[in-house]
Image: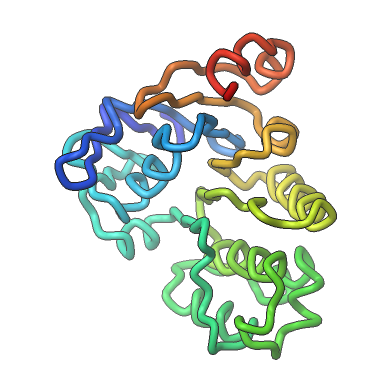
């Protein structure tokens, strides 16, 4: 059994049908990317896995445990963490307070120093409030807050969006380090080069349907696939 197995996922916003029988699997220690044009359903897929959006039908099994229909806090306790596109850090709390608060209800947790070793900038800014951080620092904090809970799988929604190239490079390096250490990751990202540098496998969504599955290497060698499914 895969670490994550998703079958027949159908999600709606009101009466609007957004995901159509989405199915995917993620193996332990694997990095899987979800690609697609804007509005394809990528972020909705992550939110449906995490319970932010409740799927009407379908199955989400993490490490043998069915999660579909559970509340987000219960899914988090089961070992899944979503790093939202908008980061959602506590602006009035310090970096360290954000991290400690996230760790309080975790069954297992990373020590603070492990987070700081991965993101040395956070250690430098440990007493700074969320409102005083740059966009890149906020993204580091959002990822660090997820990791401190020692999750089985991390869902990253547009982690590189709007960041300077040097910050993207540092975050890609951190994600590579995570993957090398065995962290399972599902990544949604518009930066195709950064995504394909990280991912082992890729799913492409179009209008809420999975239209392609393959290795990241195959995508890199097949510009026709990129043009057909991702071209503007």
Looking at the image, the residue that sits furthest to the front is 232
Looking at the picture, how far across and down is residue 190, in whole percent? 61, 39
Compared to residue 144, the image places residue 188 above or below, namely: above
Residue at left 17%, top 47%? 14
Residue at left 44%, top 29%? 25
Looking at the picture, how far across and down is residue 177, in whole percent? 76, 49
Looking at the picture, how far across and down is residue 59, in whole percent? 26, 35
Compared to residue 206, the image places residue 180 above or below, namely: below
Instruction: For the C terminus, give its image quadrant.
Output: top right
With 191 as the anchor, is 13 left or right in this view? Answer: left
Compared to residue 120, the image places residue 159 above or below, namely: above
| Of residues 10 and 75, the one drawn nearer to the viewer in this rendering | 10
Name which quarter of the figure residue 201 lies in: top right
Looking at the picture, how far across and down is residue 124, in whole percent? 81, 81
Asked which colour scheme the image uses, the reply is: rainbow
Instruction: For the N terminus, give its image quadrant.
Output: top left
With 172 as the anchor, is 85 left or right in this view? Answer: left
Residue at left 33%, top 39%? 61
Residue at left 23%, top 46%? 13
């Amino acid at each position: 059994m895969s670490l994550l197995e998703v079958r027949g996922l159908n999600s709606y916003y009101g009466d609007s049908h957004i995901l159509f029988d989405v199915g995917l699997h993620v193996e332990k220690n694997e990095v899987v990317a979800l690609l697609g044009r804007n509005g394809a359903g990528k972020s909705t897929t992550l939110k449906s896995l995490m319970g932010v959006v409740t799927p009407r039908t379908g199955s989400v099994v993490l490490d043998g445990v069915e999660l579909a229909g559970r509340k987000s806090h219960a899914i988090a306790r089961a070992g899944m963490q979503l790093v939202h596109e908008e980061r959602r850090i506590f602006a009035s709390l310090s970096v360290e307070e954000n991290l400690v608060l996230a760790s309080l209800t975790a069954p297992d947790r990373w020590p603070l120093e492990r987070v700081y070793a991965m993101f040395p900038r956070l250690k430098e800014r440990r007493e700074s409030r969320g409102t005083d951080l740059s966009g890149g620092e906020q993204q580091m904090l959002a990822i660090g807050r997820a990791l401190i809970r020692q999750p089985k799988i991390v869902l990253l929604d547009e982690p590189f969006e709007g960041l300077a190239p040097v910050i993207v490079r540092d975050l890609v390096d951190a994600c590579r380090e995570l993957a090398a250490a065995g962290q399972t990751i599902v990544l949604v990202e518009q930066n195709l080069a950064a995504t394909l540098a990280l991912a082992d496998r890729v799913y492409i969504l179009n209008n809420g349907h999975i239209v392609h599955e393959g290795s990241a290497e195959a995508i890199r060698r097949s510009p026709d696939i990129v043009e057909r499914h991702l071209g503007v």
